[in-house]
């Protein structure tokens, strides 16, 4: 009996680990997302679509796609690339309810040459956010993004009111004293075609 219980516990642990490592852009997870667009008449699939584990972002109208699940104290890993030209986008963290195209959240910038900046949006704040005009905490190092068409990586660690950001394995930002420690996670469309892949949140 003890051996059976041990085997069951090991199998349950393995399932949990596998679930944590699942790419959330996989097709079977499509129903776990909410889409907010500026132009409501446009088909959301023309802006955000999934194909073979890749989130494809179009240029039809600004907006974002976010998880339906809220997260607190997590590690996020994701990769992105620009497919036709360099542009602007962002990973949105701790998004609050009452969605708007520019939500209440923290945005990790992906704008070309600015990846790693953090913007405190619509009332959110952090101890390091001393810019009362653009509400931006600049990245720590010179830009280390890769060339057009190449994949970049981002790691975000959210823990007890602190956000730490690495771009291509280089520490680029850290903010503390967050207004909120929990919320949805989203990915922007700001008019430039791009792709995301390998999203893991654990």
Image (spheres, rainbow, N blue to C red):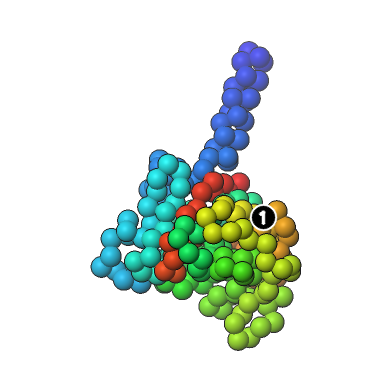
Residue 18, given in percent of the width and then of the height, sits at: 57, 34
Residue 40, given in percent of the width and then of the height, sits at: 29, 68
Residue at 46% x, 73% y is 102
Image vertical order of residue 83 relative to residue 20, above or below: below
| Image quarter in which the N terminus is found | top right
Label 1's element? loop
**Residue 107 vs residue 19, the one in the foreground:** 107
**Residue 110 vs residue 101, the one in the foreground:** 110
Image vertical order of residue 18 relative to residue 158, above or below: above
Identify the residue at the far left of this view: 41
In this rendering, does residue 185 appear at all? no
Query: Which residue position is annotated with label 1?
Result: 168
Horizontal relation, residue 179 to residue 170: left or right: left
Image vertical order of residue 70 relative to residue 128, above or below: above
Residue at 31% x, 71% y is 39
Residue 153, given in percent of the width and then of the height, sits at: 61, 53
Q: Which class describes the residues within 10 Å of circle 1: few (<14), some (14-19), or many (20+)?
A: some
**Residue 2 vs residue 19, the one in the foreground:** 19
Residue at 44% x, 51% y is 55
Residue 10, given in percent of the width and then of the height, sits at: 63, 25
In this rendering, does residue 77 appear at all? yes
Identify the residue at the far bottom of this view: 133
Image vertical order of residue 156 relative to residue 122, above or below: above
Horizontal relation, residue 100 to residue 70: left or right: left
> Exactly how many numbered labels are in the figure?
1
Residue at 72% x, 57% y is 170
Dividing the picture into quadrants, the one containing residue 123 is bottom right
**Residue 133 vs residue 192, the one in the foreground:** 192
């Amino acid at each position: 009996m003890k051996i059976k219980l041990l085997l069951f516990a090991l199998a349950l642990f393995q399932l949990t680990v596998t679930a944590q490592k699942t790419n959330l852009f996989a097709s079977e997870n499509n129903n776990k997302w909410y889409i907010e667009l500026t132009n409501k008449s446009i088909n959301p699939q023309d802006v955000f679509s999934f194909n073979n584990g890749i989130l494809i972002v179009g240029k039809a109208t600004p907006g974002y796609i976010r998880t339906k699940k809220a997260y607190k104290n997590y590690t996020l890993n994701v990769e992105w690339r620009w497919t036709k030209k360099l542009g602007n986008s962002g990973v949105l963290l701790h998004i609050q309810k009452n969605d708007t195209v520019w939500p209440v959240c923290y945005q990790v910038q992906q704008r070309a040459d600015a990846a790693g900046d953090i913007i405190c949006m619509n009332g959110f704040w952090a101890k390091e956010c001393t810019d009362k005009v653009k509400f931006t905490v600049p990245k720590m190092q010179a830009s280390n993004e890769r060339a057009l068409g190449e994949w970049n990586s981002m790691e975000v660690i959210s823990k007890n009111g602190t956000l730490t950001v690495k771009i291509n394995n280089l520490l680029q930002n850290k903010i503390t004293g967050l207004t909120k420690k929990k919320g949805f996670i989203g990915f922007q469309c700001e008019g430039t075609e791009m792709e995301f892949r390998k999203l893991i949140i654990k």
